[in-house]
Amino acid sequence: MTLSNLHLSDVLEFSPDEGQIRFHEQRVVLLSAAALGLLRKELVATLGAESARRLLLRFGFADGYHDAVSLRDHLNWRQPIEGIRAAPSLYILEGLVHARFSSLAFDPAHPSAFEAEQVWRHSYEAEQHLHHYGRDSSPVCWWLTGYSSGYMSACVGEEVYFVETACAGAGARECRVSGRHAEGWGADLERLRFDFRSADLAADLDRLRKEVHAERRRLRRRERELSDQARELDLLRERVVRHARSRRFVLASAAMREVLELAARVAPLDTTVLVGGESGTGKEFVVRMIHEQSARARGPLVSVNCAALTETLLESELFGHVRGAFTGAVRDKAGLFEVASEGTLFLDEVGEMTPALQAKLLRALQEKEIRRVGGERSIRVNARVVAATNRDLRAEVAAGRFREDLFFRLGAFVITVPPLRDRREAIPALAHEFVNRAATQYKKPIQGITPAAMTALAGYSWPGNVRELENAMARAVILASGPRIAPADLPPEVQAYRHVVAARGGSRGTADASDEEGGEAGAFDLARHERELIRRALARYRGSRKRTAAALNISPVTLWRKMKQYKIADEADDER
C-alpha cells in the first residue's frame, strides 16, 4: 500500500467511545487553521518574530520526523525513495498545503547528494500570516519548512534541511522550498543548524527571560521617574497657586496657569528670561514671581521702564555715571546693574531701546561687566536680567530695529502672556475680584455684577487687557447706584458691545460669528477700539500726551507710536 492510492479513511481512525482520533496509528487532535494561526500570532507577540520562527521550525522538524518514521512502519517502505515521493501526497492528505516536486535528485548510495525543489500552493501558514499581519518582507511558512526538513531527514537517514525561497505570505504567487543534504549547504550549514536544533531552544528561552526581566526593570524605573515627575509637577502647581493667592492674583484660566508654571520652572535657573505680551496682560506679575521664586529672592528686584527715559538718561540709569560726566553730574552714581547685584534687574519695554544702547546692554550681558558713563574702568556686576516687551521682537529683528544677537541673549527662555481676549473664561473671576477690591477701597456696598453687565464684559475685546478691566471695574463701582454693577455703570466702549448684540437680536455666539466674518459693527475690532480709546483720552486731556499716556497706563513713546500707527493727528502737547 502506498500513499498514492490511500484515502483519508484508510489512515484516519475515529474512536468516539474513547474520545480519540488516530492518524496512521498515532493519536492526533483536530485543530482549525485559525486556531494554529492564533497560536502562531501569540508566539510572535510573546517571543518576537525571530525566536517564534526558530521555535516553529524546530517544532515542525520534530513533527515531520515523527510522521515519517510512523508512516514508514505503517506502510513498510522498502526504500527511502518511497517515503520521499510520498511527501506531497501526505501534505495534501493532512490538509497542510498542496505540494508537488519540481525537481528531485536522490541516490541511496550517495545520500549526501540529495537535492529537491517543491512548489506549494494554499499554504495554511501563509494564509494565517497574511490574515494577522498582512504581507511580510520574508518567507513565513516556518512550521511547514521545518516539517519538510524533519520528514526528509527521517526518510534519507541523514541531516536534510529545507529553506523557503519564495512565499505567498511575502507577495509571491506560490511558495517554493529548496532542500539539500547538510553537506550541500556549505557555509550556511551552521546557521541552519542553529535554527533547527532544539538544543538551542533553552538558550533562546533563557535569553528571552533575561530580556523580559530587563524590560520589566526598565519599565519599573520609568514608572518611578514618571511618578517622581508627577509629584514634582503637583508640587510646582501647588507653589504657583500659593504664590498667586498670596499676591491676590486671580488664577482663573488654563492659559495663565501654564504661563505661571513656566515661570516657576525657570525661576531657580540663573538665566535671562524674556516675557512677551500686550500691555496690561500681567507681565510684571510674571517677572516678580520669577524673582521671588529664585535663589536671588533675598536680593533686590530693580525695575526700569526703557520707554520712559531718553537714551542718555537710560544709559546713566542702567550703568551709572561718574562725577562731571555731564552737566548736573555732581557726584558718582551707581547704575541699576550695580544696585541689582545678587538680585534681579527688570528691563520693561526693552523693545523701545535705541540701537546704540542695545549694543552696550549686549556687552553687559556677555561680559558681566559695565562701565559708568564718563568712567574709564570696568565694574563686574552680578545681576540676573529679566526683560519684558509688548512688541514682536522677532519682527523688530527682521526689520533691523532690534539686534538679533541681543534678542537671542535676552530670549534664552521666552514666556508669552496671552491677551485677555484669548482667556475670556477668566473675565468673570477677574471682574468680581476687581469689584470687591474697588468696593473696599471706596467703601461702597457693591455685592456683584448683573448678568447683562457680565455679558458685555465677557464680549468686549479688552485692548488694554487686565489693566483696562481693572480700571473699568473701579469706574463702575464709583458710578454704581445699586447693589450690583449694571450695564450703565460700564465704560461706553464696553456698553457698545451690548448694544450691538441687542441690535442684532442675537447671542454672544452670533456676535462672535458675525465679527469673524467681517461684520460692519466690529465688536471685536481691536484696532478700532484702541484707536477710539486714544482719541477720547487725548480729547479729555486736551491733547496732553504725557497725561494721556499716564491715564492709559502706557509710556509717552508707546502713545506716540500708536498715534502714528493709527494716523491720529499729532496736535498733542508734550509739555502739558
Image (spheres, helix red, strand yellow):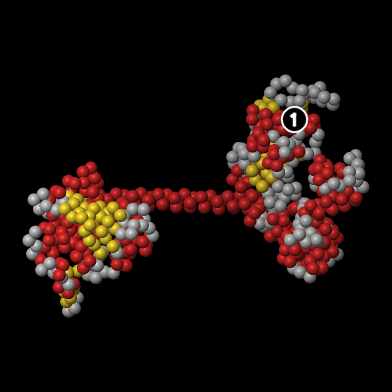
Quadrant location of the C terminus in the rendered image: top right
Q: Looking at the image, which residue is at 9% across and 62% down?
A: 77
Task: Please state if 229 lies on the left or on the right of 139 as rendered.
Answer: right
- The secondary structure type at the circle numbered 1 is helix
Task: Please state if 19 lies on the left or on the right of 473 as rendered.
Answer: left
Quadrant location of the N terminus in the rendered image: bottom left
In the rendered image, residue 25, in percent from the top left (x then y), is placed at 13, 69
Q: Looking at the image, which residue is at 13% across and 64% down?
A: 71
Task: Please state if 8 lies on the left or on the right of 273 as rendered.
Answer: left
Q: Residues within 10 Å of mark 1 (few under 14, many from 20)?
A: few
Q: Which residue is mark 1?
A: 356
Task: Please state if 286 lies on the left or on the right of 56 as rendered.
Answer: right
> Could you tell me if residue 296 is visible in this image?
no
Furthest-top residue in view?
376
Q: Nearer the viewer, residue 204 or 155?
A: 155
As shown in the figure, which amino acid type bears the numbered disc 1? Ala
Q: Nearer the viewer, residue 396 or 390?
A: 396
Q: Nearer the viewer, residue 383 or 458?
A: 458
Q: Looking at the image, which residue is at 22% across and 61% down?
A: 100
